[in-house]
Amino acid sequence: MKILVTGGAGFIGSNFIRYILSKYPDYKIINLDKLTYAGNLENLADLEKNKSYRFVKGDICDQKLVDQIVGEGIDVIINFAAESHVDRSLYDPKVFMQTNVLGTQTLMESALKHKIKRFVQISTDEVYGSLKEDESPFTEESFLITNSPYSASKACSDLLVRAYQRTFDLPAIITRCCNNYGPYQFPEKLISLFITNALDDQELPIYGDGLYIRDWIYVEDHCKAVDFVLHKGEVGEIYNISSNVEKTNLEITHLILDCLKKPSSLIKHVKDRPAHDRRYALSAEKIRKKLGWEPEVSFEQGMKLTIDWYIKNKDWWQKVKSKEYLKYYERHYIRREKL
Ligand code: NAD
Ligand code: DAU
């Protein structure tokens, strides 16, 4: 099978490529990635000499380039490429619409032109909006009600994928996963930021009261679920992916501090994120029952693996942080105060 993975130099895409090539060594993967601030070729340095893997630097909005790649006999497209950080979407929404919506459309046009066998759109539980504490987890039938420009852009692309599937028979499937954590996550998201800040004895900025709830999954379990969808999923369907681990941000923060033996005085309550979704929780009954996928890594195991990885890979995240992170966070916190 020849797969075009987009956004494969990012967090989940790089974990996915490594997982697929170790499980199916005869598959061929082309990784198309623009290498934005979040894309890092070091995430896949171990695959540089692997003959089944090829990297192409480029934008998923570039129709000519995408056509050229898909025309090389691609069987399947798996679209991980996206602007993925909610906070950034508050300050610069346009690039979210460009990549997440128009980029997806560009890929689908090539997919139709070259009659590919399957198009998997990697989406998110954020398209369902926010849940109250006593409400049942979202299912694939829940309404799409978005609150941030990021989630709105992902919902737009989901609807466009649905429209291309229904109108033009694009063999598309959508997956919607909850919050991922694990190795190679850019240190701007809660768990990767807080582990690396704590290791550096820097403040951990908790938005608002810290009682916001997210549903967490270890990244390899997400990759395995996408593998199930790729091979067994039904065209036109949507599959939620979750391991049903609901935690408040403060619970996660204390776990990180305890594991690293750091003091809780590092916690700093800062101004809340605008339109901050209170709770995400996702039912994964459909993928479990229909495709037989089950998450394998408990939250405790996953957090231990993740924290150990960041301890052992200080060079990786220190380089990433010095390149982009400080520049961004200075701007970010100045602007946050004004929102
Ligand atoms: P990430 O930000 O770590 O990586 C995104 C990758 O896409 C980067 O390598 C970047 O260079 C690339 N990219 C961005 N714009 C591009 C463009 N125009 N053309 C080509 N490449 C481009 O993101 P992630 O956390 O790995 O998320 C991957 C996907 O999974 C996204 O679609 C995201 O919406 C979705 N998702 C993420 C989570 C999560 O918790 N991180 C949960 C559910 C769904
Ligand atoms: O639910 C899936 C989504 O999870 C993905 O679609 C997104 O790509 C991914 O970024 C993530 O979005 P969140 O907004 O949930 O993730 P983030 O790590 O930014 O925030 C998680 C929670 O932690 C949220 O309640 C905000 C809070 N937070 C986050 C940061 C970065 C803080 O309190 N302080 C922080 O510094």
Image: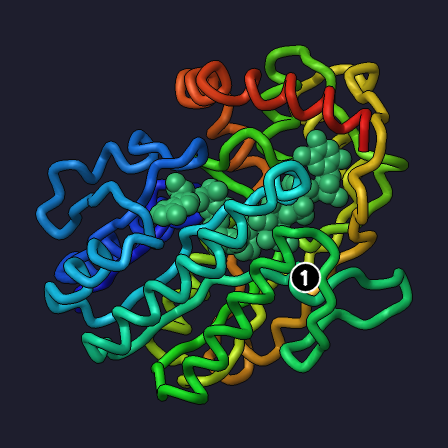
Q: Position of residue 162 (x, y in %)?
A: 49, 79
Q: Position of residue 198 (x, y in %)?
A: 66, 18
Q: Which corner quadrant holds the C terminus?
A: top right
Of residues 171 and 88, the one drawn nearer to the viewer in this rendering: 88
CB of mark 1 near ligand 2 (< 8 Å) = no
Q: Position of residue 256 (x, y in %)?
A: 68, 29
Please indicate whether residue 326 sits to the left or right of residue 215 in the image: left
User: Residue at horizontal 33%, vertical 64%?
Assistant: 107
User: Residue at horizontal 62%, vertical 43%?
Assistant: 89
Q: How is the image coloured?
A: rainbow
Q: Give the residue number, with chain letter if any, for mark 1.
A: 244
Residue 298 vertical placement versus 157 (above, below):
above
Name the element at disc 1.
Answer: loop
Of residues 183 and 279, the one drawn nearer to the viewer in this rendering: 279
Could one spot residue 317 in this view of the protein?
yes
User: Residue at horizontal 51%, vertical 58%?
Assistant: 296
Q: Which corner quadrant holds the N terminus?
A: bottom left
Please indicate whether residue 236 sits to the left or right of residue 274 in the image: left
User: Which amino acid type corresponds to the residue marked 1 in the rendered image?
Assistant: Asn
Residue 203 vertical placement versus 154 (above, below):
above
